[in-house]
Amino acid sequence: MSALLNFGLPKGSLEEPTIKLFGKAGFRISKGSRSYKPCWDDPQVDGRFVRAQEMSRYVEDGFFDCGLTGRDWVSENESSVEIVADLIYSRSSNRISKWVLAVPENSEIREVSDLQGKTIATELVKVTQSYLQKHGVDAEVEFSWGATEVKVPELVDAIVDLTETGSSLRANNLRIVDVLMETNTVLIANKKSWEDEEKRAKIENMALMLNAALQADTKVGLKLNLEKSKLEAVLKEVPALRKPTVSSLSDEAWIALETVIERDVSRELIPALKRMGAEGIVEFPLNKIVP
């Protein structure tokens, strides 16, 4: 029996983070070191790895029912696809990335109009051309095969490049002039596949589980015991404990409290709870959170 969905997975920098995310979502994906054909533990899903830059074209044309790519490449390819869900993750972080116009620190280019007659290097050619047209600027946009930040000022006057933190740009003595667009990973579907009731239900289920795994990635669970008389003071002083579950213990003077908190506040929160009289504090990892 053939699989229900032909799913496109991103090859390259997103490959390993994607496999890890699917694992947390409950889908085990394995592959050989040289294979473009993943092996799914779900018999309803099949597919292969392709570059994120090409994914939206394959989904639009119906080679894939759905796939993962960036909003930027959907725009660049001008693809007519259904954007099912935003999945904010990347190779190094869970944050939104930006395509920025950047120039050398000592460049005389201070705003978009200063690019008149200049040369810009980028992978995002069509989006950059549209951006220049919108601002009434006539400049040459050339495709860059990579390592775009090293091409200024010797080869080009400016670049449009993808950044999360700006650290690579600063390391190359580059200054951001403007932001062209924000982007993140998205789950997209072929329009015809999205109209198929069975396929749509499967895609929506996968989107729910992937988002649940991402929601859990930045949070942890917390359990503790506390004297009942101290509960109001703890909730008042510790805003991270919003709407906790409170249960009675065999000792009527004590309660058990359970909640979910942001992972990065636990290092300050747990000592504070201990000082306020909490006992038996347990922090535990979460696999999925469905709001």
Image: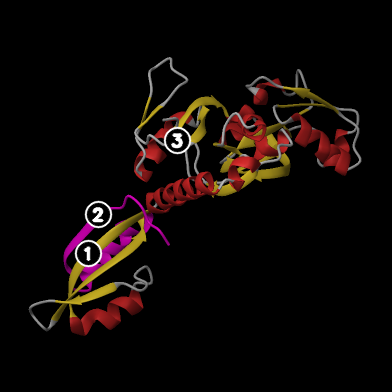
Label 2: few (<14), some (14–19) or many (≥20) C-alpha neighbours in 10 Å: few
The stretch of residues the image draws in magenta is: 264-291
- Which residue has dot 2 on it? 284
Q: Amino acid at mark 1?
A: Lys
Could you tell me if the residues under marks 2 and 1 are in contact, i.e. CB atoms within 8 Å?
yes
- Which residue has dot 3 on it? 18
Q: Is residue 185 visible?
A: no
Would you say 284 lies left or right of 52 here? left
Q: Is residue 147 above or below residue 98?
A: above
* Viewer-side label of 3, 2: 3
Q: Amino acid at mark 3?
A: Thr
Residue 132 percent location from the top left of the image: 84, 38
| Viewer-nearest residue: 14 or 170 | 14
Q: CA distance from mark 3 to mark 2?
A: 23 Å
N-terminal label among 3 and 1? 3
SS at badge 2: strand
- Which residue has dot 1 on it? 223
Classify residue 169 by image quadrant.
top right
Residue 158 percent location from the top left of the image: 76, 29
SS at badge 1: strand
N-terminal label among 2 and 1? 1
Q: Amino acid at mark 2?
A: Phe
Label 3: few (<14), some (14–19) or many (≥20) C-alpha neighbours in 10 Å: many
Q: CA distance from mark 3 to mark 1?
A: 30 Å
Q: Is residue 157 visible?
A: yes
Q: Is residue 229 magenta?
A: no
* Viewer-side label of 3, 1: 3
Q: CA distance from mark 2 to mark 1?
A: 8 Å
N-terminal label among 3 and 2? 3
The residue shown at (34%, 33%) is 41
